[in-house]
């Protein structure tokens, strides 16, 4: 009788172990933008690829549009292990204590995606991602969005038009300095709060790639958009280091492969997604879209370039110089 009970117990025990072993590993991937954006599409693509390559041993739950966490909360959630993956904008790593990422926010430092990729896809990009290790965060990849343009409820054709405007920024000291260089008043707000802040006049204007502006319906509460494309906005895909290092090696390899494919995909679609959104904004008829002349572009550059020197002590002069070297940017030639 006793032996039978033990045998029964063993069978039940191994069955439950078996079912435990078959439980997929769940990765919560939280982000703040809409699904129909470069990051939204890339996160969905990653889910598909990761679940395919791991043959269902990993389940990716994507939470878009700040439905799980807002900007600041998501960083904290990652560190305590409440979510496993994020792709915050590079402008949002200062509060984590990794100020060097703000180098990507310097106005005009990248003259297009090709320049940018020299950094994000080279050793300097890797070196920056490795700085996250000390915070218990592992940097996995860079995903593109695009170049930001300014919007407000008045035409913005010269730096003088910014005087006194309250401008929403992400939590970056470089962006703060850039907005002050234009004579405007920067205000840090979580991305999820921007639409309402614009609608109610808490802030007057903002800057974003057009895909973010359009998918958050900011164009409905901003009468004027100037295609300045003055600065870059992109993402670092990150995970909780302890979680990642604790994954079975074969799964980690499959996830790395899924990520590599997703990164290629993200960086292929980003430009096109922003162009699609620009067309949609124009078609909506709600926002006047203005393309600055060459002389107006130069005036914007001249006003904002002081941010590069003003921020040297925060980001590191050597880091800024090594990016200049990589991309061939020369502030003296503006
Ligand atoms: C913003 O806050 O404007 C962006 O970082 C949002 C995003 O993730 O693209």
Image (spheres, rainbow, N blue to C red):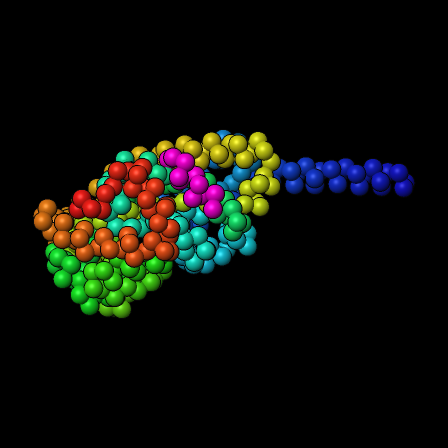
For the question of whether residue 223 can be seen, the reply is no
What is the quadrant of residue 111 in the picture?
top left
- Depth check, front residue: 324 or 9: 324
Residue 84 in the image, given as x and y percentages of width and height: 51, 47
Q: How far from the left and from the top, in percent, is residue 229?
A: 21, 47
- The secondary structure that dominates the magenta segment is helix
Name the residue nearer the viewer: 134 or 9: 134
The vertical placement of 308 against 254, above or below, is: below
Residue 129, located in which quarter of the rendered image?
A: top left
Q: Is residue 278 left or right of residue 168?
A: left
Q: Could you tell me which quadrant the N terminus lies in? A: top right
Residue that appears at 58% across and 46% down? 242
Which sits in the foreground, 138 or 44?
138
In the picture, measured across the screen, residue 108 lies left or right of residue 138, that is: left
Q: Nearer the viewer, residue 38 or 290?
A: 290
Task: State the image coordinates of residue 12 (x, y, percent, origin top left).
Answer: 75, 40
The question of residue 244 being in magenta is answered with: no
Residue ID at (32%, 42%): 323
Q: Is residue 306 visible?
A: yes
Chain part drawn in magenta = 121-131
């Amino acid at each position: 009788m006793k032996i039978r009970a033990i045998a029964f117990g063993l069978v039940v025990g191994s069955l439950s172990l078996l079912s435990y072993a078959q439980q997929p590993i769940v990765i919560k991937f939280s982000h703040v933008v809409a699904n129909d954006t470069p990051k939204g599409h890339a996160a969905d693509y990653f889910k598909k690829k990761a679940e395919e390559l791991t043959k269902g041993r990993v389940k990716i739950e994507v939470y878009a549009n700040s439905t799980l966490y807002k900007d600041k909360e998501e960083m904290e959630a990652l560190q305590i292990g409440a979510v496993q993956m994020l792709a915050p904008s590079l402008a949002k790593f200062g509060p984590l204590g990794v100020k060097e990422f703000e180098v990507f926010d310097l106005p005009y430092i990248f003259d297009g995606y090709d320049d940018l990729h020299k950094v994000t896809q080279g050793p300097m990009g890797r070196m920056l991602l490795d700085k996250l290790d000390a915070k218990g965060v592992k940097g996995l990849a860079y995903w593109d969005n695009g170049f930001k343009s300014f919007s407000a409820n008045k035409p913005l054709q010269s730096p003088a038009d910014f005087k006194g405007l309250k401008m929403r920024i992400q939590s970056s000291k470089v962006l703060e300095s850039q907005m002050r260089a234009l004579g405007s008043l920067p205000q840090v707000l979580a991305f999820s709060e921007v639409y309402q802040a614009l609608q109610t006049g808490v802030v007057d204007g903002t800057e974003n790639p057009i895909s973010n502006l359009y998918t958050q319906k900011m164009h409905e509460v901003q009468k004027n958009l100037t295609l300045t494309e003055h600065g870059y906005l992109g993402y670092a895909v990150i995970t909780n280091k302890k979680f990642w290092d604790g994954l079975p090696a074969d799964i980690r390899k499959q996830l790395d492969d899924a990520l590599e494919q997703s990164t290629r995909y993200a960086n292929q679609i980003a430009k096109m997604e922003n162009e699609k959104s620009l067309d949609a904004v124009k078609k909506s008829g709600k926002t006047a879209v203005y393309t600055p002349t060459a002389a107006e572009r130069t005036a914007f550059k001249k006003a904002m370039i002081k941010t590069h020197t003003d921020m040297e002590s925060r980001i590191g002069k050597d880091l800024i110089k090594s990016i200049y070297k990589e991309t061939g940017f020369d502030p003296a030639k503006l």
